[in-house]
Amino acid sequence: MARAGIAGEETGGPTRPGLEVGIVGYGAYVPRYRLPTTEPARVWNGCRAPQPIRELSVPGLDEDVVTMSIEIARNALTRAGIAPKDVGAVWVGSGSHPYAVKPTGTLVAEAIGAAPATLAADLQFACKAGTEAMQASFGLVGAAMARYALAVGVDTARSRPGDTLELTAGAGGAGFVVGPAAESLAVLEGCVSYVSDTPDFWRRAAAAYPSHAGRFSGEPGYFHHILEATRALLHRLGAEAGDFAHATFHQPNPKFSERVGKELGFSRAKLRAGSLVDRIGNAYAGSALLGLAAVLDVARPGERILAVSYGSGAGSDAFSFRVGDRIEDRMALVRPTRDYIAERVELDYAMYARHSGKIARG
Amino acid sequence: MDGARQWRTRAARYSLLGAYCGRCDKPEFPPRPRCPRCGHETTEFAFSGRGTVYSYSVVRQGPDGFADQVPYVVALVALEEGPLLAAQLTDVEPGELRIGQPVEMVTRRLRDDGPQGTVLYSYKFRPPRGWQTAPSG
Ligand SMILES: [Zn+2]
């Protein structure tokens, strides 16, 4: 039985908050270490053929979701040009917070100088955790409960040794200072969320690595949720694919986002700016936000941007932004996303195993 | 470093928050409530995080809690605002380093006390690749 769509419903709730809001500043971060995917293929399959994703970003030995979030937040605040004390929420979405209990958000809030008078928390929703933080930030600022809110999505994706995820799981993320539309470099035109209980990917608390069920991950997972959320957003905005200069979708691999783009009518050229998966892998909760940050790096005033996440378990957030005049000055304040990606120190599988905690000194 | 001391010094450790003496017109790190030169009460001072490598040495056998990051580089960093400070360098191969090398502050894991303990985060320095770096064309 086909599941009901929400595109035609008139009662889906508002697509944006009461006050006009947008992105005041943004920041990205990708660690400098790279694992060519031919390495896990060589070690586990004796295979030397190129893999669908060329290489994966890997955190340094002293990096984790906290340290990456702090750099993302600093970059975003530099672009926003606001005082850290004016940040009323620090929300970090990730599937790899260093503690099971003890928030990443408070540490980031301290490090950037937003503490103590701020909300701070961690969000968990597989690869959708970061865009969930964005939705909450738009709501909070749009309800005038804070002038600014910081939403971060970042991951150091884990994979069981020998699992196919070792050919796809990357690290990195991005964050957005959300604030009033008048100060924004990109104004939120609308957002929609679409969720269902779908068992495509999970990790129990005591398990070191995630598990996945292949039969749920494509059609009923990724494609269904992204297509429904995007169609609903376009319908409510009265917009179509041709109205957007750029679109970026969650990128678990190069094929999925291209196929979903094609199905929705977005040419490959419109996906190009935000397509990063071939060079860093799937950054999970960081993926859709990194794609949006890379698009903002090249966006021009007046352009419209579509950004859509997908998180297993499952759900999609779809956002539409209109780029404003402030983009050009703000973009130039921080090194762009592509420069983080371009810097690379190659690891072999043995060093990767150490960096990812798969082996430790005995 | 015990837990209480770690907690008291977190602002200095995470974001290089120092102190400033108005009478001597000098910033100070680590921060102290009174100026070590004249005893005048200090105020908070946020360092830019920019500096240069004054000297360095490579650690190949780390103490407990640091062993999982060896080999690493410990350097004396001359902060742009004056003070000299001992800190780890990160994201750098020892071969790339030279005296006078510009560096910027980042916040990284300094030590990990294992599955039952906490993670200690601290400033470290690396060759500039963050917001100080000019964007490419
Ligand atoms: Zn003094």
Image (tube, coloured by chain):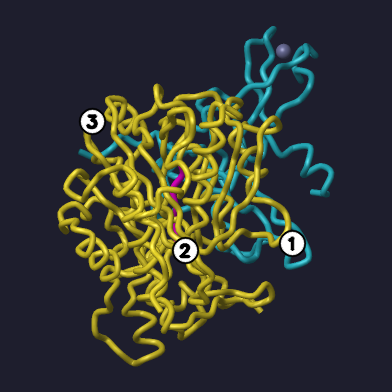
Chain colours: A yellow, B cyan
Q: What amino acid is labelled 3 in the image?
A: Pro
Q: Which residues are magenta?
A: A171-175
Are the residues flagged by discs 2 and 1 in contact, CB closer than 8 Å?
A: no
The residue beneath circle 1 is B113
Q: Position of residue B116 (x, y in %)?
A: 78, 66
Ligand 1 occupies quarter: top right
Q: Position of residue A66 (x, y in %)?
A: 59, 51
> Mark 2: few, some, or many residues within 10 Å (few <14, many ≥20)?
many
The residue beneath circle 2 is A311
Of residue A298 and residue B118, the one placed in the foreground of this image is: A298
**Callouts 2 and 1 in the same chain:** no
Q: Position of residue B60 (x, y in %)?
A: 59, 63
Q: What amino acid is labelled 1 in the image?
A: Asp
Query: Magenta stretch: residue A172 in it?
Result: yes
Label the magenta part by its dominant secondary structure. Answer: strand
User: Closer to the observer: label 2 or label 1?
Assistant: 2
Q: What amino acid is labelled 2 in the image?
A: Gly
Indicate the secondary structure of the residue bearing disc 3.
loop
Are the residues flagged by discs 2 and 3 in contact, CB closer than 8 Å?
A: no
Indicate the secondary structure of the residue bearing disc 2.
loop
Q: Is mark 3 within 8 Å of ligand 1?
A: no
Tell me the tag on residue A301.
3
Give the answer, above or below, for where B57 lies relative to A331. below
